Image: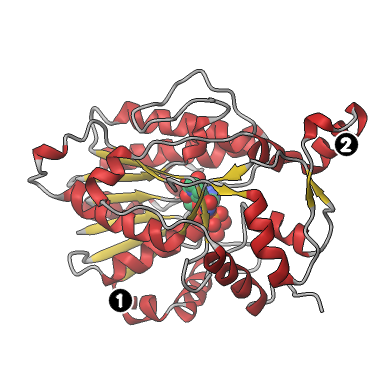
Amino acid sequence: MKILLTGATGFVGSNILEFLVENHEVDEIYLILRSTSEQNASSRFQDMVAASNTIARHYNKVKLFNGDLSVRNFGLKENEYKFLTQQTNIVIHAAASTQFDLELTEAMKINFDGTKHILDFSEACKEFKHLFYISTAYIVGNYPQVFKESDYNVNQKFENSYEETKYLAEGEVRRGISSLHSTIIRPSILIGDSQTGKVQGFKVLYPFIKLIAQKALSIIPCQSEACLNLVPIDYFNLIFSILFKYQLSKNKPSHLNISTSTFHVINNQNAMIKDLIEYGCPILNIEAPLLVDPEKLPPQRRRVIKRMFNHYFPYLNRPHLFDNSNTLKVAQHQCPIIGKDIIKNMLNYCCEVGYLNKHR
Ligand SMILES: NC(=O)c1ccc[n+]([C@@H]2O[C@H](COP(=O)([O-])OP(=O)(O)OC[C@H]3O[C@@H](n4cnc5c(N)ncnc54)[C@H](OP(=O)(O)O)[C@@H]3O)[C@@H](O)[C@H]2O)c1
């Protein structure tokens, strides 16, 4: 198998890369990596090799292409793009902007245009077999009912450019499904490894945890029953490895009766915010912020608080319900419940690498 992988410098993509390099059926992996103002793509890749013994062991399997997904043909030279279309048979698209506060036009460039460029590329591949697309369960938007794997347009409204552009991008992948074999994987909120707490990059939930750790929040505007759907990355890795094998297998067992090629990677038990606070604050030696129902705040204070919590506010105040029947039929593993030990491992890792500090 020869695989094109996007997003390898990111949290999800770096985990997928570790899985691919160790997979004996994978012969070559092509990465599309951007240069930054400080570092060219090849020196970024050297850093990835230095950070991972697994990648370092299989260094020779990986070939680097300095490209930008938001640009047509990834901005590659004609001969490079042609080489990739001749060689690649599997595409894994894990690149995206996960920033909630990007302008819609900026978010569209990477999340929507980038995905369209991946679909164009897949169609141009001579020996194309399958596209794995990493979507998000949060294309659910404000839909108040259980969001099923077969659901897509449920008349939901979106809270930010991330949700909206990921929704639109998934729409393009779904349209392409008739001509391309594709799998859509929708994780909820990913956190570090359940055993070690290890995480690559501190995004999504982590900046919020940092605000609490810095004692910048004395209250959290949510009801006492508020919860989040959290998935440790090792569970995502397990499910990805099973789906990868299953979706590429020629003889799928018909008794599983899988109705769509969309799979939710979610936790069947939401984590209560009050429990996360109760477990986490003693580890950081800080006083627990109070959970205050925003509806009970005077209107002016509520407006200020809502503005202050900005992008987090909807996530604290919308219980999301996801169904993962397809995933469970194929993978038969449930996500671990987020209890004291997982929170301890997560916060200890953040402190060990200097992202958070414990107070004395
Ligand atoms: N993290 C979560 O909790 C979570 C939950 C659900 C779904 N997801 C989905 O999982 C996927 C990966 O997310 P993540 O958490 O790994 O995000 P991440 O850590 O922010 O990584 C994003 C990756 O995309 C790459 N990228 C962005 N724009 C690019 C461009 N124009 N050209 C080439 N590469 C580009 C980044 O490269 P640079 O290093 O060059 O910026 C990076 O490698 C996304 O589709 C996201 O929607 C994530």
Residue 183 visible in the current orientation = yes
Quadrant for residue 142, please give it. top right
Disc 2 target residue: 304
Q: Position of residue 100 (x, y in %)?
A: 65, 42
Disc 1 target residue: 60
Quadrant for residue 6, please give it. bottom left
**Amino acid beneath label 2:** Val
Residue 47 is tagged as: none
- Asked if the residue under mark 2 is in contact with the one under mark 1, i.e. CB atoms within 8 Å, the reply is no
Left or right: residue 134 compared with residue 255: right
The residue sitting at 40% across, 54% down in the picture is: 335
**Amino acid beneath label 1:** Asn
Q: Quadrant of the N terminus?
A: bottom left
Quadrant for residue 175, please give it. top left
| Nearer-the-camera pick, 138 or 118 | 138
Left or right: residue 208 compared with residue 259: right
Secondary structure under the numbered disc 1 in the rendered image: helix
- Density class for disc 2 (Cα within 10 Å; few <14, some 14-19, many ≥20) is few
Vertical relation: 218 (above or below) 58: above
Q: Position of residue 20 (x, y in %)?
A: 30, 65
Q: Position of residue 90 (x, y in %)?
A: 25, 51
